[in-house]
Image (cartoon, helix red, strand yellow):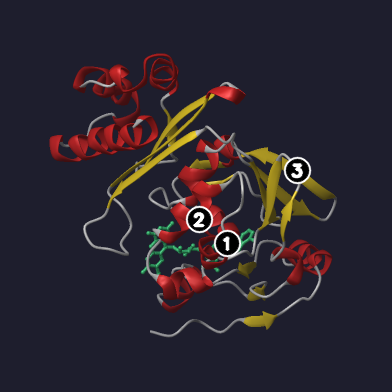
């Protein structure tokens, strides 16, 4: 099937993008890398009247060192992060490398992935685990939303129809911080069935455990994270992990539950080894 007809624009300034979004009254769609939107257009699951192509917009391609954080433009591709290890944000390269396969990573963008908000995607899990902030641009300027509250549901976010993800600010982790990331994929390049991210950064008094590939947004396992920060891998047992997961997983089949438990265990193991 082919996409329904749409008007195509390629603004060259961020201000022109947000003005066009505002003027379109929800009838326009941003085109980041097209890796999700492209198939949705072709299947006619999305039928916007207008496409605003931001795939090469210079303002969205910038990666900037802010001192205590990295600001990553919303149009930065997974491949750009894979190819450039950002000092203090090394987990980004590691996560980027595991997204789909290189052709997807060459086009897919951080902003597009966060906005699309697939529950099994990598950035919606990684960004809250790293304590990132989403920088959103609209006609009245920028606003900032913590990554942990940005994704509100499966394919739902805090973005308004006339807003764009301008950037993501990711705080730098300490030199002795530990990161663990694990996902179960049936085949290389597929979305995972279970995923977990762990950050232990005692110097900054940060301990986070997040899990993804749920029915809704990724979730934090706070109490487990505190326990791991105090006792390391000793805090991990079948019982402690299943108790931590219980309120988050709800009713799912036993095999699926086991995948989530093992993803958490393996991510913690990587962060505490
Ligand atoms: C075969 C395949 C396998 C994949 N596997 C994985 C995987 O393992 N892990 C993973 O994380 N992802 C995976 N993806 C998704 C891919 O990584 C892309 O990140 C994702 O499709 C969206 O990014 P995009 O830049 O292509 O956005 P687009 O497809 O262009 O847009 C997606 C949505 O975001 C909106 N949007 C785009 N840019 C912005 C912006 N800056 N601000 C606000 N809204 C915006 C669009 O309007 C649209 O609604 C896979 C995709 C495919 C096709």
Q: Quadrant of residue 85?
A: bottom right
Q: Residues within 10 Å of mark 2 (few under 14, many from 20)?
A: some
Residue found at x 35% / y 28%: 248
Mark sitting earlier along the chain (3/2): 3
Residue lying at the far left in this picture: please name it. 254
Mark sitting earlier along the chain (1/2): 1
Q: Is residue 7 left or right of residue 90?
A: right
Instruction: Return the mark for residue 84.
Output: 1
**Residue 38 higher or lower than 144, as above or below:** below
The residue wearing badge 3 is: 67
Q: Secondary structure at mark 2?
A: helix
Q: Is residue 195 visible?
A: yes
Q: Is residue 119 left or right of residue 113?
A: left
Instruction: Return the mark for residue 268.
Output: none
Do the residues under discs 1 and 2 have CB atoms within 8 angstroms? yes
**Residue 259 higher or lower than 18, as above or below:** above
Q: Secondary structure at mark 1?
A: loop
Q: Quadrant of the C terminus?
A: top left
Q: Residues within 10 Å of mark 1 (few under 14, many from 20)?
A: few
The CB of the residue at mark 2 lies under 8 Å from ligand 1: no
Residue found at x 57% / y 36%: 175
Residue found at x 55% / y 71%: 33
Q: Quadrant of residue 84?
A: bottom right
In space, the residues marked 1 and 2 are separated at their CA atoms by: 7 Å
In space, the residues marked 3 and 2 are separated at their CA atoms by: 19 Å
The residue wearing badge 2 is: 93
């Amino acid at each position: 099937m082919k996409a329904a007809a749409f008007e195509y624009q390629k603004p060259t300034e961020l201000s022109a993008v947000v003005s066009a979004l505002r003027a379109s009254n929800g009838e326009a769609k941003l085109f980041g890398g097209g890796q999700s939107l492209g198939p949705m257009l072709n299947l006619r699951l999305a039928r916007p009247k207008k496409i605003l192509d931001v795939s090469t917009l210079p303002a969205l391609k910038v990666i900037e060192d802010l001192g205590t954080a990295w600001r990553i433009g919303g149009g930065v591709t997974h491949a750009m992060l894979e190819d450039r290890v950002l000092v203090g944000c090394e987990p980004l390269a590691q996560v980027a490398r595991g997204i789909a396969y290189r052709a997807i990573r060459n086009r897919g963008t951080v902003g597009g992935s966060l906005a699309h908000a697939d529950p099994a995607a990598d950035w919606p899990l990684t960004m809250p685990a790293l304590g990132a902030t989403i920088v959103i641009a609209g006609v009245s300027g920028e606003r900032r939303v913590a990554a942990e509250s940005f994704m509100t549901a499966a394919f739902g976010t805090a973005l308004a129809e006339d807003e764009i993800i301008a950037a993501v600010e990711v705080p730098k982790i300490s030199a002795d911080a530990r990161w663990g990331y694990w996902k179960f994929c049936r085949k290389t390049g597929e979305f995972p069935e279970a995923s977990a991210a762990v950050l232990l950064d005692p110097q900054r008094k940060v301990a986070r455990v997040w899990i993804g590939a749920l029915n809704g947004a990724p979730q934090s396992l706070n109490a487990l994270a505190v326990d791991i920060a105090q006792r390391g891998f000793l805090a991990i047992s079948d019982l402690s992990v299943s108790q931590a997961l219980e309120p988050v997983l709800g009713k799912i089949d036993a095999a699926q539950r086991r995948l989530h438990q093992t993803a958490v265990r393996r991510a913690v193991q990587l962060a505490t080894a």
